[in-house]
Image (spheres, helix red, strand yellow):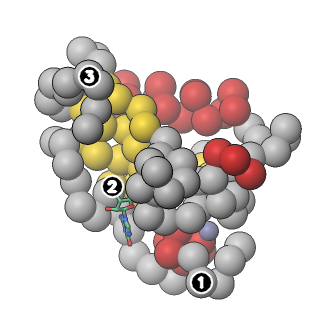
Amino acid sequence: MDAECVFCSIISGRLPSARVHESDNFVVIKDINPVAPVHLLVIPKRHVESVLSVSEDFPAGEFFDVVKRVAEQEGLRRGFRLVVNTGIEAQQSVPHMHAHILGGRSFTWPPG
Ligand code: 5GP
Ligand code: ZN
């Protein structure tokens, strides 16, 4: 828990959010500034700055279970994009690792 971190504050309930799912180690919230009809953030409860600081005991199996469960819950049968912006060049803006689930429209590849 990092007292300065916006996602730690959301996880602890000090800041409000629209939660769509919670598991032992993750919360899933609606992004405050959605860029797709479905735009969710899968956030580990434990503060980890980015993928670059994820350790071996990261609950990766639970992470993918949560992604699959939420995608099903949100009706994303035709697919979705799962994005983990990491570091400066990827424009990660919140230094608490999280995955975006983007769905409900078509996307182009490569991304901008
Ligand atoms: P990043 O750029 O780090 O990959 O993504 C951070 C995301 O967090 C952005 O899409 C931004 O809209 C979202 N975000 C930032 N602050 C808040 C907040 O206080 N509440 C919610 N629900 N989303 C936030
Ligand atoms: Zn944090």
Task: Quote the CA–CA distance across marks 3 and 1.
Answer: 35 Å
Residue beneath the point at 26% across and 22% down: 109
Of the numbered discs 3 and 1, the one sitting upstream in the chain is 1
Quick one: label 2, few (<14), some, or many (20+) residues within 10 Å?
A: some
Front position among marks 1 and 2: 1
Of the numbered discs 1 and 2, the one sitting upstream in the chain is 1
Image coords of residue 55 (percent x, y): 81, 45
Are discs 1 and 2 less than 8 Å apart at CB? no
Image coords of residue 40 (percent x, y): 36, 47
Image coords of residue 86 (percent x, y): 54, 48
Mark 1 close to ligand 2, CB under 8 Å: no
Task: Quote the CA–CA distance across marks 1 and 2.
Answer: 21 Å
Q: Determine the quadrant in which ligand 1 lies.
A: bottom left
In the foreground, 63 or 73: 63
**Residue 22 shows in the view:** no
Mark 2 close to ligand 1, CB under 8 Å: yes
In the foreground, 20 or 58: 58
Residue located beneath label 1 in the image: 4
Front position among marks 2 and 3: 3
**Residue 51 shows in the view:** yes
Q: Tell me the kind of residue under disc 2.
A: Lys
Quick one: label 3, few (<14), some, or many (20+) residues within 10 Å?
A: few
Which quadrant of the rendered structure holds the N terminus?
A: bottom right
Residue located beneath label 2 in the image: 30
Residue located beneath label 3 in the image: 109
Residue beneath the point at 26% across and 38% down: 112
Left or right: residue 15 compared with residue 49:
left
Q: Secondary structure at mark 1?
A: loop
Task: Quote the CA–CA distance across marks 2 and 3.
Answer: 24 Å
Q: Tell me the kind of residue under disc 3.
A: Trp
Are discs 2 and 3 less than 8 Å apart at CB? no
Tell me: residue 111, above or below residue 94.
Answer: above
